[in-house]
Image: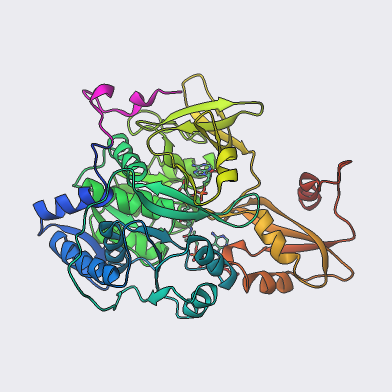
Amino acid sequence: MNAWHRHLPEGLEQSEVELLAGETLPSVWVRQWREQPQRAVIHDPESGWVKGQELLDRSEVVAQRLGHAGVEPGDRVLLSATSSAELVVAHVAILRLGAVVMPTNGAYRAEEVEHVVSDGRPKVAIVEQPEWREWIHSADPSVAVTSPSVELETGRNIRLDRTETTDPALIAYTSGTTGRPKGAVLSHGNLLSSVRGLEIAWRWTPDDTLILALPLFHMHGLGVGLHGSLAVGAKVVLLSEFNVDEVLHSIAKFDATMFFGVPTMYSRLLESPKATELEQLRLCVSGSAPLAAELHQSIHRVTGQHVLERYGMTETAMLVSNPYEGERRPGAVGFPLPGVEVRLEGDPAEIQVKGPNVFSGYWERPDENTEAFVDGWFRTGDLGAIDPEGYLSIVGRAKELIISGGFNVYPREVEDVISQYEPIQECAVVGVPDEEWGEAVIAFVVADREISDEEIKNFVGERLAHYKRPRRTYTLKTLPRNALGKIQKNRLVGQIET
Ligand code: MLC
Ligand code: AMP
């Protein structure tokens, strides 16, 4: 399925599309800021509009400080904070130095932070949460911890902007079906080719202004919203959190043209009497989780917007998108983006992908890398179907994954934590359909007494990020198993639906 020419605007030939041109993320950004130093780039409530020249100057200062602290090209820097211009400056600085950003979810608790630090071995951690200092030190006392303003000493002048397209830019942690989260290593070329493809497919131009309320520690907010805006030379309004009134107010205030969100955000926006503010946008994009066809249609009824649904992954950045021109089909994710190849393999049919956007592998995980690829195709673990007009739909998952409000929860990770709770003999975690979150995390436990929802929420909540906490817990005498002893999760789900 290589029909990505279906995204090209009239007059542009497939052979004319150049996604990389030997560039890197900061080489593209820095060039534009030098060319138009007085142009506004980023807005946050604290700084107001930040212009190109200020981004150049501030990122240089921070890069020099990091360099003086011993960060060299290829070294990792852990980065975790609420969205702000300061966070963007730190991100740009790390990349200009040639170091690798480890974006980390600020909701992580001690065990999750310790795992990421031990696994990724960052030289410096730039974090806003005071309690993380202790957690980082307990995992690795040699890591220098600083706040998002990076108040480190500066020293001799270090040369910046010498990175190559193939050099790593991000190590993004993503959980897996087995064991602990692993780091997906994405190069500048992977990330840049993805946003170049989106620029063409979504007709993204410097005249656009994006309202960005997604966190900057996952692919959607960071790899699509921020990197895309900076590469195109468009403006981006950063909101420190998702708040319905704030988003709708910002659309008018900043004369915005685009909004990107997860389905939970769209269903909350639709509940507002002011949802019609969405009308004035040029483009609304949804991704990270399935957008229910009914929600797609309700948004259209209320706001006139045909939300454009697209499909991506941490390991691959963006893969498939509904067309900008032509039908945006509810329930489908559309056609492969420029440069991306998609095939369906096996029965049930797994979506496998290839392209300049696809990562090279997981950080220091040779065995899992062998399993992740087949003949050079990356196995997404998602199940797909292609209709006669070429639209891809995601029809299920081969991997055990729950997507709650756009955040991924791997049942195995939650089960491992619940099993540590003394009264529990065994447990199984499943996802069930949920109106607000898309899917909700539910736990089944075997114990000698009734275990309450609150008990499990508290126990898990102290050890894992809030979105991984089971919303409900059911106590059973035994878990249903098949002849091979494997827990039959579908029977458990059936039990609560009846
Ligand atoms: C918050 N809570 C969640 C949750 N987010 N619970 C389950 N799932 C979630 N996603 C919890 C809170 O801890 C709280 O718990 C309760 O829900 C209510 O909190 P809230 O204030 O209403 O939530 P809010 O902070 O508004 O967050 C909702 C949200 C957020 C939708 C804004 O979840 C979010 O930013 N999601 C986006 C995730 C994202 O960026 N995904 C991209 C991954 S990249 P309690 O118990 O106190 O009530 C990817 C690739 C691709 O997937 O293709 O894009
Ligand atoms: P992550 O590991 O957080 O990058 O999540 C990637 C997963 O999110 C994919 O493998 C899909 O299962 C899911 N996903 C992303 N976009 C969509 C979408 N539009 N529809 C359905 N699932 C999606």
Q: Is residue 4 magenta?
A: yes
Question: What type of secondary structure mainly makes up the magenta span?
Answer: loop
Q: Position of residue 239 (x, y in %)?
A: 34, 64
Quadrant housing residue 55:
bottom left
The one nearer the camera, 94 or 38, is: 94
The answer to whether residue 234 is visible is no
360 left or right, relative to 396: left
Q: How many marks?
A: 0
Q: Looking at this rendering, what residue extends furthest in the top direction?
A: 388
Q: Position of residue 185 (x, y in %)?
A: 44, 49
The one nearer the camera, 18 or 24, is: 24
The answer to whether residue 386 is visible is yes
* In the rendered image, the vertical position of residue 218 relative to residue 399, given as above or below: below
Q: Position of residue 170 (x, y in %)?
A: 39, 53
332 left or right, relative to 71: right
363 left or right, relative to 188: right
The one nearer the camera, 155 or 377, is: 155
Residue drawn at the location 23% of the way across and 71% of the way down: 47
* In the rendered image, the vertical position of residue 282 relative to residue 422, given as above or below: above
Q: Position of residue 429 (x, y in %)?
A: 72, 56
* In the rendered image, the vertical position of residue 493 relative to residue 154, given as above or below: above
Quadrant housing residue 449:
bottom right
Highlighted range, magenta: 1-19
Q: Is residue 7 magenta?
A: yes
494 left or right, relative to 253: right
* In the rendered image, the vertical position of residue 382 relative to residue 184, given as above or below: above
